[in-house]
Amino acid sequence: MRASISAPFVDTKADDLVWTLSHPPVEPLATRTVTVSGREVELRVLGASHQIVLRPESDGGALVETVACLPGSSGGLPGYAEHPLPGVGDYRFDSIVESLPRAELTHRVAEIHEATSDSPGGLLVAFPGDPLAITALHLTSGSGASLRWRTWHAYPQSDELVTTTTTLTP
């Protein structure tokens, strides 16, 4: 699903992003709710950042993954993080920040559009002003009962592409 928004792209860079599992949900610019493996998952674009909200089952816990530029936070994105989350499952997060030549960034953004725009688990926001300024999320089912999602944050002003991959195994 491609969402149209009127919010301008705000200059930022990959180094400004932080990752947390403890930030409360914030008002998104675009959202999509998907049910996978019996769990409701909300994909939220917050500008050049995202939240994934996994709603609790009747006796399970909730998960809120945030990758964003949060006031007062620093430290950047971890390349890897793994956490057991009681009532939710085993959580694994990976991220990579790539500095790309403009032609390669253009190619990769086109591939992201193709992978997410019409996918039942995809959400892509393209920001006005620069066709390479996107935030995209793609939820897929993993192996067995696990959930997997990927996100992309493109920063054309610095020719950076941030890719995150998360796997949650109940």
Image (cartoon, grey):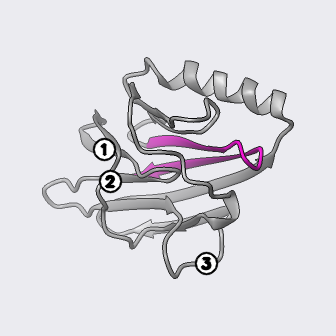
Q: Is residue 81 left or right of residue 90?
A: right
Residue 33 occupies which quadrant of the picture? top left
* Residue at horizontal 49 percent and vertical 71 percent from the top: 70
Report helix, strand or loop for mark 3.
loop
150 part of magenta stretch? yes
Q: Disc 3 or disc 1, which is closer to the eye?
A: 3
- The residue tagged 1 is 41
Residue type pointed to by label 1: Val
77 part of magenta stretch? no
- The residue tagged 3 is 74
Distance between mark 3 and mark 1 Cα atoms: 27 Å
* Residue at horizontal 66 percent and vertical 62 percent from the top: 80
**Tags 2 and 1 touching, CB below 8 Å:** yes
First-in-chain label (2 vs 1): 1
- The residue tagged 2 is 53
Q: Disc 2 or disc 3, which is closer to the eye?
A: 3
> In the rendering, at what x and y percent does residue 64 appear?
36, 61
Residue type pointed to by label 2: Val
> In the rendering, at what x and y percent does residue 126 appear?
51, 33
* Residue at horizontal 46 percent and vertical 50 percent from the top: 47
Instruction: Specify start and end residues of the magenta stretch as a single range.
Output: 147-170
Binning the other alpha carbons within 10 Å of mark 3 as few (below 14), some (14 to 19) or many (20 upward) gives few
